[in-house]
Image (spheres, rainbow, N blue to C red):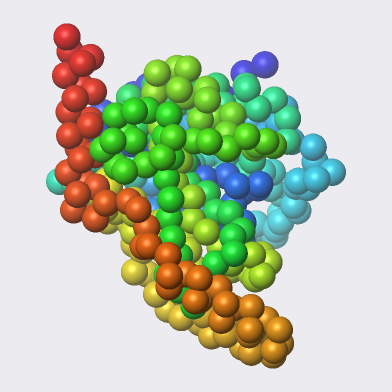
């Protein structure tokens, strides 16, 4: 059974493409990561160049398909989608290959291999996974993005850490290992989302992920388009916390702790972009030898 359909064999070459992906599920609290990738395709021609068949990968009692009516009032079934799109950025450092999808329930290794096949087929230089995790951080402070990689060159270039986590993982954890084994440089970026907000939307966290991407990749990400939504949700979060004296005291404690800690350990935006490009040049030089 062919689980991956591709349509990029006749595609005009991409300019030094980078794959950016996020999957709704364990690694995407409040869907901040998938929302960020969706912004990258907003108001842009972003054709689908590959898709993964959902049937082998999902328990449809958990991720149920939905019935919809099209413009002609005909019923159709919408299944969980994992479609790869391309976004070209003429004159910029990179084109992007984008996946904003749904974490599978089954056959993680096969799903990861589909991602690797697309990355290799389109010549992606690096794969960047985006995620969000619940953390003890205040909603009233800028969301912090941290990154990790198993690639020593990327760790040095971008000020990342080596992954140290041990325990239950999701598809992203499996994919990072598979990319490493396939020799494809990979970066995992994660933003902290206030745990006390539950799954409430947090556009400011999505904007933080996009801002880091823009600094590193040198392409416009549309992070500022989330400013209005971010302000609206900040007001809603403030109101929810203000209704509970215990929550108000807890957030004040988190604010004090946050203010004492150092800002993110990653380098400045200008340094990130320059060091990332230096890493890619060294990669190309190694391959040419």
Image position, residue 170 (x, y; %): 64, 37
Q: Is residue 231 left or right of residue 72?
A: left
Q: In which quarter of the view is residue 54 placed?
A: top right
Q: In which quarter of the view is residue 120 placed?
A: top left
Residue at screen point 45% across, 17% down: 182
Question: Where does the N terminus fall, quadrant-wise?
Answer: top right
Q: Is residue 184 left or right of residue 203?
A: left
Q: Is residue 196 above or below residue 107?
A: below
Image position, residue 10 (x, y; %): 34, 24
Q: Is residue 191 above or below residue 142?
A: above
Image position, residue 151 (x, y; %): 37, 28
**Count of marks placed on residues:** 0
Residue at screen point 79% across, 37% down: 59
Question: Where does the C terminus fall, quadrant-wise?
Answer: top left
| Nearest to the observer: residue 26 or residue 100 | 26
Residue at screen point 17% across, 13% down: 288
Residue at screen point 38% across, 62% down: 262
Q: Residue furthest front?
A: 260
| Nearest to the observer: residue 111 or residue 181 | 181
Q: In which quarter of the view is residue 5 placed?
A: top right
Q: Would residue 122 be seen by someone viewing this image from the given angle?
A: no
Q: Would residue 78 be seen by someone viewing this image from the given angle?
A: yes
Q: Residue furthest top?
A: 289
| Nearest to the observer: residue 159 or residue 86 | 159
Q: Residue furthest right?
A: 61
Image position, residue 35 (x, y; %): 51, 58
| Nearest to the observer: residue 66 or residue 130 | 130
């Amino acid at each position: 059974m062919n689980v991956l359909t591709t349509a990029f064999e006749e595609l005009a070459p991409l300019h030094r493409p980078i794959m950016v992906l996020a999957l709704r599920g364990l690694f995407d609290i409040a869907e901040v990561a998938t929302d960020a990738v969706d912004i990258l395709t907003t108001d842009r021609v972003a054709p689908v160049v590959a898709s993964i068949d959902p049937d082998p990968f999902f328990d449809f009692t958990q991720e149920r398909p939905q019935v919809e009516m099209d413009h002609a009032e005909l019923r159709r079934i919408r299944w969980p989608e994992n479609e790869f799109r391309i976004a070209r950025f003429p004159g910029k450092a990179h084109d992007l290959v984008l996946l904003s999808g749904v974490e599978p329930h089954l056959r993680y290794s096969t799903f990861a291999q589909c991602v690797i096949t697309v990355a290799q087929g389109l010549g992606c230089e690096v794969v960047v996974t985006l995620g969000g995790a619940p953390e003890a951080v205040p909603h009233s402070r800028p969301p912090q993005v941290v990154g990790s990689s198993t690639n020593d060159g990327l760790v040095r270039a971008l000020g990342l850490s080596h992954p140290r986590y041990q325990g239950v993982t999701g598809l992203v954890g499996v994919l990072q290992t598979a990319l490493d084994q396939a020799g494809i440089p990979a970066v995992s970026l994660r933003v902290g989302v206030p745990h006390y907000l539950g799954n409430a939307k947090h556009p400011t966290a999505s904007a933080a992920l996009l801002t880091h991407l823009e600094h590193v990749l040198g392409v416009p990400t549309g992070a500022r388009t989330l400013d209005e939504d971010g302000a609206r949700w900040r007001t809603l979060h403030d109101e929810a916390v203000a209704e509970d004296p215990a929550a108000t005291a807890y957030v004040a404690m988190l604010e004090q702790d946050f203010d004492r800690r150092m800002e993110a350990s990653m380098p400045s935006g200008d340094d990130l972009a320059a060091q990332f490009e230096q890493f890619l040049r060294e990669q190309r030089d190694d391959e040419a030898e």
